[in-house]
Image (cartoon, helix red, strand yellow):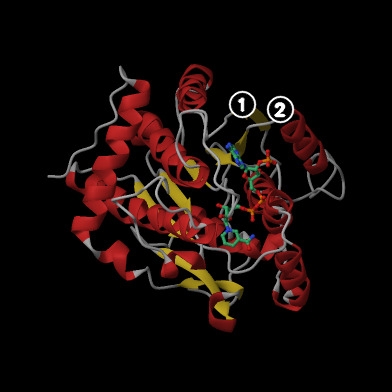
Amino acid sequence: MPVSWTTASIPDLSGRLALVTGASSGLGLETCRALAAHGATVVMACRSRQRAEAARQSLLTPTGGGSPDAGAGASPWGALDLLDLDLADLASVRSAAAEVADRYGRLDLLINNAGVMAPPRTLSRDGFELQFATNHLGHFVLTLLLLPLLRQSPAARVVHVTSGAQYFGRIGFDDLQGERRYDRWQAYSQSKLANVMTAVELQQRLQAEGSGVLSLAAHPGLARTNLQPTSVAMNGSPIEAFAYRLMGPLFQSAAMGALPQLYAATAPEATPAGHYGPDQLGGMKGYPTPVRIAPAAQDADQRQRLWQVSEELGQAVLGDVALTLGRA
Ligand SMILES: NC(=O)c1ccc[n+]([C@@H]2O[C@H](COP(=O)([O-])OP(=O)(O)OC[C@H]3O[C@@H](n4cnc5c(N)ncnc54)[C@H](OP(=O)(O)O)[C@@H]3O)[C@@H](O)[C@H]2O)c1
């Protein structure tokens, strides 16, 4: 890996189609900016059309980088398209995937980035715990529904955005939805561990079917985005608000936080099932480097169990849609 990999190392992406979930703010917005600046057509998949349009407009300004006269001499900016997607509603996930197939008939990059952190126990539209539903299950189903398009691309990648919280996570198979006991931080860690488990298991299954689609994972360290303010707003916790203020100097910018997922999505040297994060302060800030995955994600039995449960839950809601991707 080159020293201090930055967006300047992203290859020309002209002709590539990328879909980024949670593109309305934070890491998702920065990911869209960098991909479009290198010529990709970017589908900004968001639950609020209003916030999505505001985010798109923020990119299409001279300071956003995407005005027609910006970047003269560099690769031309790619188009920025909008897609309605609520990951906490599997019917919306199904419609979004169908819309991508209808509109484009292809897909090269899928960045599973959207997330919520540590809300009070809340249920998704389908009755699942909100973090499990948004961070894990919605992305799991979206990925399986988009795989037929990704398989057609000569060099497709799926990037799963996880977190350092994965190292504290465990999959509570006996109480996945936190019905008996809900600890909002444990539920967040569970969902982020599920992201990296899915990344590794998906790679295994793609390899088993002889597919060239790559599955990778990345975490941003600590990045200044809407994640923490939204979490505080949902919990009304003054202690957490104070803790984040104290931690202020540790936070890096959203643009820096997005680098590991951009590396996973575009670097030619990124490896199948590779996991990337920042290289400094124990993975809290810095430039992308390979980082270890949580031990539970290295356990094939746990991965396969999570995969099977996720398939069953998705199938229970969507019924008629095929959500299986077998192992050899
Ligand atoms: N920032 C960090 O320090 C940090 C650390 C570790 C991991 N991460 C991970 O990084 C990813 C991006 O988070 P961020 O830090 O950029 O936070 P953010 O600024 O709050 O962005 C989160 C994005 O997810 C979207 N989202 C939330 N629920 C959704 C749903 N049901 N359907 C579709 N989109 C939904 C949000 O949309 P709205 O605008 O509509 O709310 C927003 O666009 C998350 O997966 C998070 O777990 C972040």
Q: In which quarter of the image is residue 278?
A: bottom right
Position above or below: 152 against 233: above
Q: Which of 285 and 250 is in front in this view?
A: 250
Q: What element carries label 2?
A: helix
| Crowd band around label 1 with a 10 angstrom C-alpha radius: few (<14), some (14–19), many (20+) | some
Q: Please, which residue is most extreme toward the bottom here? A: 281
Give the number of the disc on residue 239. Answer: none
For the question of whether residue 204 can be seen, the reply is no
Q: Quadrant of residue 155?
A: top left
Q: Nearer the viewer, residue 322 or 216?
A: 322
| Crowd band around label 2 with a 10 angstrom C-alpha radius: few (<14), some (14–19), many (20+) | some
Q: What element carries label 1?
A: strand
The residue depicted at 53 percent of the width and 19 percent of the height is 103
Amino acid on which disc 2 is placed:
Arg
Looking at the picture, how far across and down is residue 315, in whole percent? 31, 27
**Residue that label 2 marks:** 49
Query: Marks 2 and 1, Cα distance to the nearest angstrom?
Result: 7 Å
Relative side of 272 to 178, left or right: left
Position above or below: 228 against 322: below
Relative side of 183 to 215, left or right: right
Asked if ligand 1 lies within 8 A of label 2, the reply is no
Amino acid on which disc 1 is placed:
Asp
Q: Please, which residue is most extreme toward the left here? A: 328
**Residue that label 1 marks:** 84
Position above or below: 229 against 49: below
Q: Please, which residue is most extreme toward the front here? A: 180
Tell me the quarter of the image containing the C terminus: top left
The residue depicted at 60 percent of the width and 50 percent of the height is 119
Comes first in the chain, label 2 or label 1: 2
Question: Is there CB contact under 8 Å for labels 2 and 1?
Answer: yes
Looking at the picture, how far across and down is residue 11, in whole percent? 56, 54
The residue depicted at 42 percent of the width and 70 percent of the height is 167
